[in-house]
Amino acid sequence: MFKTSDMVNINYNLQGSGKPIVLIAGFGGYQEIWTDQVNYLLKMGYQVLTYDHRNMGKSERTEKGHTLQRLTDDLIELLHYLNINSAVFIGHSMGGSILYDLYKTKPELIKLSIVVDQSPYMLNTADWPYGFMNYTPENYLPETLRTPQVRETLHGIDGEVLNNLSKVKTDYPFSRKENMDLLQEHSRLDWRDTVKNISTKLIVIAASQSPYYNSDFARWMAENNSNIESVVLENCGHDIMAEIPDRFNQLLRHFLLKNRYLPK
């Protein structure tokens, strides 16, 4: 466990000894969602950091710090504690928004990055059709109170990931209600200007059959910043890396090697 500056215990797992890669889970997520990426990256020779956000997974339950900035600060403090001065970051869902915030707050930490199925703005407007489901500035507060009645994946997640997730979800259940303030803030934050100013290589991976987002948000990101590459994958839902891990890991490997981020 690592203790943050506001005295909250964060559960983390640091493995391997090569160059670091940091995996950031989403809202209500558990670091076990990255099981197939951790195994793959360790075999490649990288050092891999996974962790649970405050109030999630095995990290401490607390009523304080339910903001995206505080979650980003938790990550920055954890990296400082572990003497990680720069790394590759992979953020899934809300973890992608934490990555957007990291670009705004501490961009020098980021060598390369990957965003997995997270639009830079979650509220649909007349000129922005890339928000979360039917959320708009007018309805998102009551809408967030309702758990989306959709399947996050198309075919279910990989068996090993599912086994690891099932146990930790039972032992450390997540409360959507107790994190509603975080979800509502996350929903209204607009990272589009931040995305336009990203100065390191980023690949955004979207799912054509995501239940949450129109995958064209990824194309918008690439069209608005030459440092960003977009990929849309078929036959999967929101949890891309856990549903089609082999395809995801091949993309990951290619992106790392193409940009010369070698394990040693």
Image (cartoon, rainbow, N blue to C red):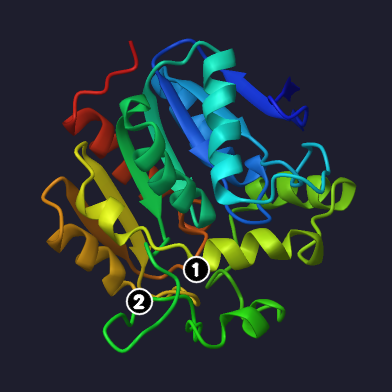
Mark 2 → mark 1, Cα distance in angstroms? 13 Å
Q: Residue 60, which numbered label?
A: none
Of 159 and 128, which appears nearest the observer?
128
Residue drawn at (29%, 69%), measured in percent from left and top? 217
Q: Is residue 92 left or right of residue 3?
A: left
Look at the numbered disc 1 and give the secondary structure of its residue.
helix
Which x, y percent locates residue 166?
A: 78, 52
How far across and how far down the image is residue 129, in percent? 33, 82
Label 2 vs label 1, nearer the camera: 1
Q: Which residue is mark 2?
A: 130
Residue 149 appears anywhere in the view: no
Above or below, 212 against 262 in this view is: below
User: Residue 188, labelled with which disc?
Assistant: 1
Which comes sooner in the sequence, label 2 or label 1? 2
State whether residue 169 appears in this view. yes
x and y percentages locating residue 62 in the rendered image: 82, 44
* Residue at 23%, 57% in the rendered image: 230
